[in-house]
Image (cartoon, rainbow, N blue to C red):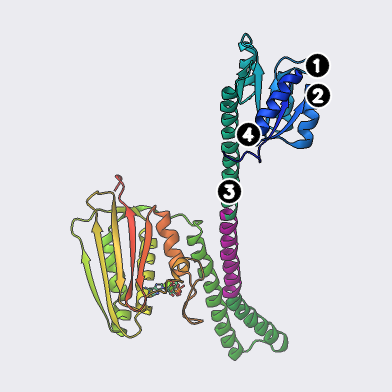
Amino acid sequence: MSDHSDWHILVIDDEKDILDVMCLTLSDKGYQVTTAPDGTSGLDLCRKVSPRIVITDIRMPGMSGLEVLEAVKVLDPDIEVIVCTAFAEMDLAIQALQLDASDFITKPISDHALHLSLKRAKQRYTSRKKLQDYTKFLEKQAADQAQILHQDKMMSLGRLAASVVHEINNPLSGILNYIRLMSKIIEKHPLKEVKINKFKQYLELVESETERCSQIVSNLLAFSRKSPPAMGPVRIQELLNKCTSLSQHKLALQDIVLTTAFQPNFPDIQGDANQLQQCIINLIFNAIDAMPEGGALHIDSQYHTDKTHVTITITDTGVGIPEDNLPHIFEPFFTTKQEGYGVGLGLSTVYGIIDHHNGRIEVKSRPGKGTTFIIRLPVTDSC
Ligand SMILES: Nc1ncnc2c1ncn2[C@@H]1O[C@H](COP(=O)(O)OP(=O)(O)OP(=O)(O)O)[C@@H](O)[C@H]1O
Ligand SMILES: [Mg+2]
């Protein structure tokens, strides 16, 4: 026999004989049973003993079974209520079901009908509890996930803020120093020829440091999608040729062999040629930096058979990117280069520009073996 001791049942009926028989039958089956002779005391007991199932007669003096059902559901909607009706009271039974009774049984109550009804009520109760637990579990998971994402975002933003402060602070303190120096000189001495030359030199430094600041800010703007691209037809092959000839000198200096494979009959794409050139140059320069001892750089372009997009692939045989760094390389100011050699804005700018062109950029890397960047750009009808 299955263990029913966890199941507390409250039986409400104004007929003492029925209460006694029910109490005996249910206790025999192992249920915990409490009985009440009317609706009002039944509800009081319901509050005190918190049963999982209430079996109530429909026709009772005072509070009717339907009123008991409604009050129990207000008290705790999870309690299952089975109502007992006479044969001729189908309309009452239907009303009870509409008020969320789990079942009705007709009098005289047979053992079989009672146990079938209890089985259904228990199933309903258990499934509802399982669903509630599962919903709680899912809600908690969603909340945890959101919390993790939020923390990640805050950490990235924190890193970004720290880097902006760091990178802009250096040129700004340079600017400030030269301005102070110039003010002091003006205070102490009238301007002589030799001072004017010094001044010119300082002003040049002020200008170049200010340009550095504005370069950092404009790269950040490209990443944050604030500077819109100037769209027009772009010949990818021509663009790649221009980028490789611009890099030729750097490649030769570092003993890097360049190979290219540009697919013929390439369509024009819609884009901002300057911004796309900036992307390719950034990727080539990163590849060069990754091959300090020389190596091979391969660039290819393909027009895909589905005619929806083109890809540009840039592969180097350099140091590669450690797995831990991969999730961060597109973040602004992420750099592994020595102070003064990299700001960490190259790839974030590339990412922002490609995203602006509705394209995608992917990276594959094997530490010690090399890295491949793949850019996919859509080909639109207007080209
Ligand atoms: N081809 C590559 N091979 C190995 N590591 C790379 C490659 N490209 C990028 N990385 C890694 O990603 C980091 C971020 O690159 P990103 O271009 O954003 O910044 P950076 O080159 O360090 O500085 P910046 O481009 O602003 O001068 C690099 O510091 C480097 O660690
Ligand atoms: Mg770079």
Residue ID for mark 1: 62
Residue ID for mark 4: 29
Badge 3 or badge 4: first in the primary sequence: 4
Badge 2 or badge 1: first in the primary sequence: 2
Q: Is the residue marked by circle 1 packed among few (<14), some (14-19), or many (20+) residues within 10 Å? A: few
CA gap between label 3 and label 4 equals: 34 Å
CA gap between label 1 and label 4 equals: 31 Å
Badge 1 or badge 3: first in the primary sequence: 1
The residue closer to the viewer here, 273 or 190, is 273
**Amino acid under label 1?**
Gly
CA gap between label 2 and label 1 equals: 8 Å
Residue shown at 69% from the left, 29% from the top: 24
Q: Is the residue marked by circle 4 packed among few (<14), some (14-19), or many (20+) residues within 10 Å? A: some
The residue closer to the viewer here, 225 or 106, is 106
Q: What stretch is highlighted in magenta?
A: 145-168
Q: Residue 347 location in percent, x, y?
A: 43, 67
**Amino acid under label 4?**
Lys
Disc number lying in front (2 or 4): 4
CA gap between label 1 and label 3 equals: 43 Å
Residue ID for mark 2: 40
Residue ID for mark 3: 137
| Image-quadrant location for residue 302 | bottom left
Disc number lying in front (3 or 4): 4
Residue shown at 24% from the left, 48% from the top: 306
Q: Circles 2 and 1: CB distance less than 8 Å?
A: yes
Q: Residue 21 location in percent, x, y?
A: 69, 24
Badge 1 or badge 4: first in the primary sequence: 4
Q: Circles 1 and 4: CB distance less than 8 Å?
A: no
Q: Residue 285 location in percent, x, y?
A: 37, 74
Which secondary structure lies at badge 4? loop
Residue 72 visible (yes or no): yes
**Amino acid under label 3?**
Phe
